[in-house]
Image (tube, grey):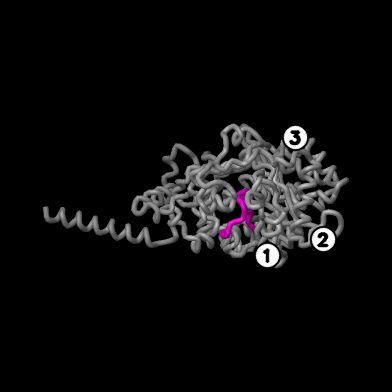
Amino acid sequence: MTTVIVLLLLAAGGIAWLYAHDVRQTQHTILRNYPVLGHFRYFSESVGEYMRQYQYLPDWVERPFNRLERSWIYRSAKGVSNLISFGSEAAPAFVFRNAPFPILDEEKTAYPGKIIGIAEGPGASRQPFHATTFFNISGMSYGALSHAAVSSLSRGAKMAGIWMATGEGGLAKYHLEGGCDVIMQIGTAKYGVRDEHGNLSEDRLREIAAHPQVRMFEVKLAQGAKPGKGGILPGAKVNAEIAAIRGIPEGQDSISPNRHTDIASVAELGAFVARVRSVTGLPVGVKFVAGHPGFLDEWFGHCVTHPEGCPDYVQIDGGEGGTGAAPAPLADYVGLPVTQALPMVVEARDRHGLRDRIRIIASAKLVTPDKVAWALAMGADFVSSARGFMFALGCIQAMKCGSGHCPTGVTSVDPRLIKGLDPTDKAVRVMRYAQRVREEVEIIAHSCGLANASEFRPHHVTAIERGIGGFRNVAE
C-alpha cells in the first residue's frame, strides 16, 4: 500500500510540474491554454507518421486544408526541415516543367519587386508603392482575429519585409504595432473611414493616409467565401474597442451591406477609386470575386477610356477563400475558383492593354510554394494569403472562428485563450513561414531554369488530370 501511495504522489507531483511548465512556456498555445491535456494532441501528431499504415483517412483528404498542407506550414513556421523521404504523397493537378540545365547558385538573381501605381498622368498617385516581395498577408480584420494575432502578424510582417492588409474592420493600433507596410481595406460598411451616417469620410481617409505605414487603399467589392454578402462579425466578438474602430454599437452583430451603397456600376466604381486616390495620394486597388466575364470587359474597357478611375491593382479572390463567418451556400457554391478566375482576369487585363497599368494579386488557398508559383506563372504579380498565416500563428483548423472560442487564441475573444498566444514567439513563426514560401518558390523557379520568380510564365506549368493507370497531360 505504501508503494502505491508513493507512486500516486510521484505521479501527482509530475502532473503538477508539467502543468506549471505548460502555463509558463510561450511556444505552444495549445499547451498554455490546455496544460497537460494538450500533450495528447502533440503526441498524436508526432506518432501519426509511424502509424500511417493503420490510418483510415489519408493525409490529403481533409478539408478545407489537408494534413500535408498544414504540416508543411507548421514545420516551416517552426523552422523545422520540410525534406521528405521515400516519395511524394501529393496528387497534383499541375506540375512544373523543369529545365534540362537548372540555375546554379551563382546564376540566381534577387526578386526585383514591382511598382504599384503610377507617378504621372490620369490616375497618378503622389506616392506609388514599390512592393519588394511577391508573398504577403491578405486582409484579416481585428475582431475576426484577436488583438494578439493581429499584433503577431504585424510584427512578423515587418521582420519578413512583407505587407499586411487590415481587412474590412478598419485600421487598429495592432496593425501598426510591428511597423510593417499596411494596406487599408475599405469594405462595404466603410468601417474606419465612415462618418456618422455610414458614408465615406474624406477626413478619416486623410487621417489614415497620414500614417507612414499605410501604403495603399483597397476597395473591397467581395471576398471568395461570401461573394454577394457583406462581412459578418457576431455580436459576441464586438467589444468596446472594436465597436469604436468600426463606429458601431458594442455587442451587436456587425453585418456589412451586400455591396457599397454608392457603387452600383462600373462608372461609380471608377469614380470611387478616383476619389479615394485623390484624397489620400496613395495607390488604390479593388478586391473582387470573378463571376461573369462580361464584367471584366466592361470594367477594363472603362479603365482605358477613363484612366482617372483605373485601379492600380486588382485582387482576385477565388470562391474557395476563407472567412470567419459565412452562409454555407455562398461558401460552397458561389464564385469561380481561383484556378479559373485568375487566368480569366489576366487575359482580360492584357487584352485591353493594361498589363503595365494594373497589377494583379491572387488569393484563395494559395498557402504553399507550389500554389504560389502556379499563380505567378499564370500572371499574378503578387500572392496574398490569410489562412496560411493563421496556421503559422498556430491555428489547428478547429473551425470555431465565428464562435469566439478558438482554442489557439487566433480568433478568440476569451482573454484566457488569447493569453496563450504570445506575439513575440508567433511573430517569428510568421516571418519563418513567409521566408520559407519565398525560398521554395525560388527553388521551383531555379529548377525551371529561371533566375528568379519574376520570370515565371504560363508555359512553365502543365495541368494534368488523374486517370486510369496514371496521369494525362491536358495542357497541349
Asked where in the image residue 206 lies, by quadrant, the reply is bottom right
The residue labelled by disc 2 is 119
Dot 1 lies on which element? loop
Regarding residue 82, the answer to whether it shows in the image is no
What's the residue at 75%, 53% (across, down)?
276
Q: In the shown orientation, is residue 414 left or right of residue 340?
A: left
Residue 178 appears at what percent x and percent y?
A: 58, 64
Report the disc number at residue 212: 1
**Distance Cα–Cα, label 2 vs label 3:** 32 Å
Residue 402 appears at what percent x and percent y?
A: 51, 43
What's the residue at 72%, 36% (across, down)?
291
Q: Determine if the magenta segment contains residue 383.
A: no
Please tell me which residue lies in front, 330 or 451. 330
> CB under 8 Å between callouts 2 and 3?
no
Of the numbered discs 1 and 2, the one sitting upstream in the chain is 2
Query: Which region of the structure is painted magenta?
Result: 163-174
**Distance Cα–Cα, label 1 vs label 2:** 18 Å
Q: Nearer the viewer, mark 2 or mark 3?
A: 2
Q: Is residue 52 above or below residue 84?
A: above
